[in-house]
Amino acid sequence: MRIKLEQVTKNYGNVQGISNINLDVGTGITGILGPNGAGKSTTMKMILGLSRPSRGRVTVEGKDPFTSQDLKRNFGFVPEYDCFYEHMTGLEFVAYFLRMHDISKEKAEGMARESLSELGLELAMDRKINTYSRGMRQKTKVARATVFNPEILIMDEPFQGADPTTRILLMEKMTKWAENGKTILVSSHILHDVQSLTDNIALINNGKMLAYGNRHEIRDLINIPRPISIVPVKKGNLRKLAKIMIDKKWTKATAIDEENNEVTIETNQSEEIYLELPKILQKEKITVEKIYSEDDSLDSLYSKLVEGAQWK
């Protein structure tokens, strides 16, 4: 299912939550990233139809989620904060919400039992929720949101407080749901997990969309130089390699680290470098130990976009 936000602004009195957000999301997993107060949760509430935009338009498959009850039956929502009936067991809690979908008591219990078991709670589903660990609570929230097989899954900080085993399990499930054609939006501060799930990201800060796409497209769009380090086998080739690199049109700057025997170049044309560099090394008879870029990560790009001077 396709989600579209067109010039969406949300005001809370004199406070602006989000401003002129544009987003077009189809099937698969999309990560929504940004610091606390950036506008991630506000954006998700608009998509879920829990809040109406002050300006702009939100549609899901061309319909307004705020007014379409049929559409809301296709939403599964994992909120950031706990919202349990603590006196219930996990099984009772998930089955209770299935009953709201006009599912019989017997069938709801069977579906809830199956969903909780798939998420590793087969031994805990008959215990009261007030005895659950944080990871068990996260799994229960996901079970409640997914048990009725929704087409759209909105997950607000699903990995927060989850132990490594729970995170891995949730990621595996999310990947499987995406492969089955679901549309999944994931808000998270754990950038490594989002990077493992998807390369399709939306970066939000101060209520504004900074960038949307995969991290390579975003880097090219905003023209952030990328450092690439080259480690020659022979130290005697260090300065020779630096001189060759600095004369190339795609090099913006070079730095020599004699202690670690490496040359680092900054470039906006990394793809061209990776294509041309082997030819250069072969021509100059320079053997290298490795070529790498520690900056090719979502964490690095996130830091540059959210904290960089270009946004201040």
Image (cartoon, rainbow, N blue to C red):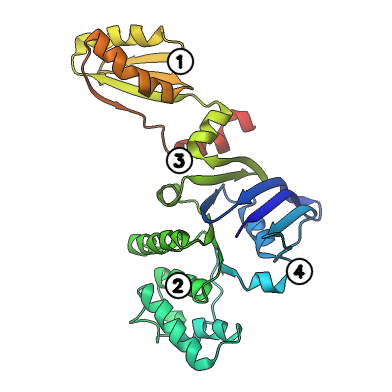
Residue position for label 2: 137
Q: Amino acid at mark 3?
A: Asp
Front: mark 2 or 1: 1
Going from N to C along the chain, the mark reached first, 2 or 1, is 2
- Gap in Å between the C-alphas at discs 4 and 1? 52 Å
CB under 8 Å between discs 2 and 3: no
- Gap in Å between the C-alphas at discs 2 and 3? 27 Å
The picture places residue 12, in percent across and down from the top left corner, at: 77, 56
The picture places residue 243, in percent across and down from the top left corner, at: 34, 6
Going from N to C along the chain, the mark reached first, 2 or 3, is 2
Front: mark 4 or 3: 4
Helix, strand or loop under label 1: loop
CB under 8 Å between discs 4 and 2: no
Residue at x-position 52% and y-position 32%:
219
Q: Amino acid at mark 1?
A: Trp
Front: mark 1 or 3: 1
Residue position for label 3: 299
Going from N to C along the chain, the mark reached first, 1 or 3, is 1
Give left or right: position of 51 versus 279: right
The picture places residue 229, in percent across and down from the top left corner, at: 33, 23
CB under 8 Å between discs 4 and 3: no
Going from N to C along the chain, the mark reached first, 4 or 2, is 4
Going from N to C along the chain, the mark reached first, 4 or 3, is 4
When asked about the image quadrant of residue 234, the answer is top left
- Gap in Å between the C-alphas at discs 2 and 1? 51 Å
Tell how many labels.
Answer: 4
Residue position for label 1: 250
Residue at x-position 61% and y-position 53%:
40
Give left or right: position of 164 versus 207: left
When asked about the image quadrant of residue 174, the answer is bottom left
CB under 8 Å between discs 4 and 1: no
Helix, strand or loop under label 2: helix
